[in-house]
Amino acid sequence: MARALGPERRLLAVYTGGTIGMRSEGGVLVPGGGLAAVLKTLPMFHDQEHARACGLPEDTLVLPPASWGQRIIYIWVQLRHYEQYHGFVVIHGTDTMAFAASVLSFVLENLQKPVVLTGAQVPIHALQSDGRENLLGALLMAGQFVIPEVCLFFQNQLFRGNRATKVDARRFAAFCSPNLQPLATVGADVTISRELVRKGGGRGRLRVCSSMERDVGLLRLYPGIPASLVRAFLQPPLKGVIMETFGSGNGPSKPDLLQELRAAAERGLIIVNCTHCLQGTVTSDYAASMTMAGAGVVSGFDMTSEAALAKLSYVLGQPGLSLDRRKQLLATDLRGEMTLPADERSWCPLPGSLLGRGLAWLSRLGDGQEADAVRDTLVPSLACAAAHAGDLEALQVLVELGSDLGLEDFRGQTPLHAAARAGQAGVVAALLQRGVQVDTCDEDGCSPLLLAVKGQVRGLGARRMCGQGQ
């Protein structure tokens, strides 16, 4: 993470709604229009003289010079054209902002630019609004620093998006990050917690995951909750549930209630145990916690309920994974959303096989140029081996390690080549969904698309691959 260089940084700002853009009519807040027009009248958000001198378009705003002499230029449009901007600011309603930030943190794979959500408790038109400081701070954080994460900026603090939760409906300090300190704090100086900022999510291009599972739910346990109510809640089409428990993961130990949890787990329902306490983590220190774990429940450690729900939807939406693999992913830190106990951090994916040992060794590599060079050398061959074997779980492990599944090995072969040659139709479909190129030629001059068109391998969906290549 380094301070941004260059005299200009271009951002894209998106207003999705919320209090910040509302206005008061008869004492009631109603949706307002023309937020960009309001910002143009505020010198802190738009330097009209500089905009005229530069001939900027009408939909483009520019901040006054920052303390490092940089100009932040931002435009209000729909979220698109990822490559054209250095960062993104999303204006969002505060009531659901923590949910949105958590979902975006999982949906945006290989994210290498800052995405900062912000909003306000009081409309920006009001004299006492907190919206001006929040929006200005979000623009400055997204424009001046390279923090390649989905973040939430509120009341002079930049939180990791999937660690934040709303804790107050009226005060300006509406959000906190209960189990992780802020990534940055803005005061007379900007203090960045550099050791907490995650590296970019891989060297591949951005991928927006669209296969989120919608049939997930949130169940808060309480003393005396009837087993019949739990049974009714856990019925199909529900595929996964976040269960909020007491303290460090305890719940009612009534046999009929535990039987309902076991029965649900046995038919494939995934249950994640999160504490309803604001701070702390789910542990196995108490007998009740151990009983819950014995019922097939996955520990959510110190995840917020918002992050856990988003993660569950993301993991269940990934195609071709076994139930055990999904549970492993839920118990793995994917986006900085949880703090694992020390004895859990050396998790070994797919133990026993040569491929599994290679992936486990790869997962233990540290940071730095040498480690990156080793990854660049090994990942293409490991990915091709996994694709040839039809091992979707191994490919998913590589994705979660930040690997680009479109890289070529020493023979110019991508995993899509390997899957096509081996007749692995499921892997071909998964790689096409991830946007792997179908027209990359290997050393023999063959592309995956050519293999499909020639019919060398049956059942690979040649028409679909042709559509991808157009």
Image: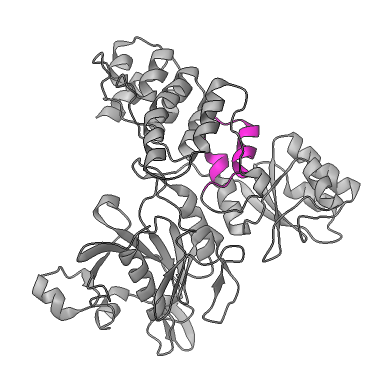
On the rendered image, what quadrant is the C terminus found in?
top left
Coloring scheme used: one colour
Instruction: Look at the picture and state if 412 lies above or below 266.
Output: above
| Left or right, 212 with reference to 346 | left
- How many numbered marks does the figure carry? 0
Q: Position of residue 176 (x, y in %)?
A: 56, 70
Q: Residue at x 85, y 42 (%)?
A: 259
Q: Residue at x 45, y 25 (%)?
A: 382
For the residue pair 109 and 21, the one nearer the viewer reads as 109
Taking the view exactly as shown, the residue that stands out farthest to the front is: 370
For the residue pair 67 and 61, the one nearer the viewer reads as 67
Q: Position of residue 383 (x, y in %)?
A: 43, 26
On whether residue 315 falls in the magenta region, the answer is yes
On the rendered image, what quadrant is the N terminus found in?
bottom left
Q: Residue at x 57, y 63 (%)?
A: 180
On whether residue 309 falls in the magenta region, the answer is no
| Left or right, 353 with reference to 12 | right
For the residue pair 291 and 351, the one nearer the viewer reads as 351
Taking the view exactly as shown, the residue that stands out farthest to the top is: 456
The answer to whether residue 214 is visible is no
| Left or right, 370 with reference to 6 | right
Instruction: Look at the picture and state if 230 lies above or below 419.
Output: below
Magenta span of residues: 314-334
For the residue pair 262 and 32, the one nearer the viewer reads as 262
Instruction: Look at the picture and state if 17 lies above or below 81.
Output: below
The answer to whether residue 281 is visible is yes
Q: Position of residue 263 (x, y in %)?
A: 79, 38
| Left or right, 85 with reference to 156 | left
Q: Quadrant of residue 18?
A: bottom left
